[in-house]
Amino acid sequence: MNIKNRIMMCVVTAVLGLGLIGGGTYAYFNDTKATQNTFATGELDLGINKETIIDIPDIIPGETVDGKFELTNDGTVDMSEVVLHSTYEVTDNNKANDGDDLGEHIQVEFLDRANEEGDVISETTLSELTENPVKILDEFPADSKPEQFNVQFKFVDNGENQNHFQGNELELTWEFVAKQTEGK
């Protein structure tokens, strides 16, 4: 064997020896645990105790009719607010209204929920309410008590001839929109 082969053999033997020594010094114990994780989304669920708040078959100028309803938070998510959106459609059954909107003559009064006497806390006409949604609740936490509302509808007698409204029907739709609170 020549010298070159001997040197090569020594180098290979040295590298192999160092590899065995170095590999042994990095030995360690190992243990692994796995976890199962779940993300379940909350539910935003606004409830109302009736489908029809008010049904007035023969209202006349000057008459006021009461309506009551309650909202519930039936979900698991806190609500930051509840906003009332209102729309209506008038069906003219007898005389032409000549551009006079029955919704401008129906006044809506929201009454204090805590007061037995029913102090007015907000009032507007149906036509104004259609153009301007109203926040009716702030902060409605999950698992809270139902919120009760008293509302009055008044056919305003303007002191003038309102015969052109005879036989008309006004179909009112109220949509309550709940928004969640911000995430944490």
Image (spheres, rainbow, N blue to C red):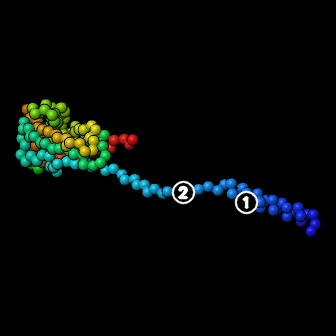
User: Which is nearer the eye, 98 or 30?
Assistant: 30
- Which residue: 38% across, 42% down? 183
Q: Please, which residue is most extreme toward the bottom here?
A: 1
Q: Amino acid at mark 2?
A: Asp
Q: Position of residue 65 (x, y in %)?
A: 8, 40
Secondary element at tag 1: helix
Q: Amino acid at mark 1?
A: Leu
On-image quarter of the C terminus: top left
- Which residue: 23% across, 38% down? 136
- Which residue: 28% across, 38% down? 139
For residue 3, side relative to residue 15 (left or right) = right
Residue tagged by mark 1?
20
In the image, residue 11 above or below residue 59: below
Contact (Cβ within 8 Å) of mark 1 with mark 2: no
User: Which is nearer the eye, 92 or 116?
Assistant: 116
In the image, residue 14 above or below residue 157: below
| Residues at marks 1 and 2, CA–CA distance in whole angstroms | 24 Å
- Which residue: 8% across, 38% down? 64
For residue 7, side relative to residue 76 (left or right) = right
On-image quarter of the N terminus: bottom right
Q: Position of residue 73 (x, y in %)?
A: 24, 46
Q: Position of residue 67 (x, y in %)?
A: 12, 42
Residue tagged by mark 2?
31
| Of the image marks 1 and 2, the number of the one nearer the N terminus | 1
In the image, residue 176 above or below residue 27: above
Q: Position of residue 169 (x, y in %)?
A: 12, 48
Q: Which of the 4 image quarters holds residue 96?
A: top left
For residue 51, side relative to residue 184 (left or right) = left
Q: Is residue 114 visible?
A: yes
User: Which is nearer the eye, 81 or 37?
Assistant: 37
For residue 184, side relative to residue 9 (left or right) = left
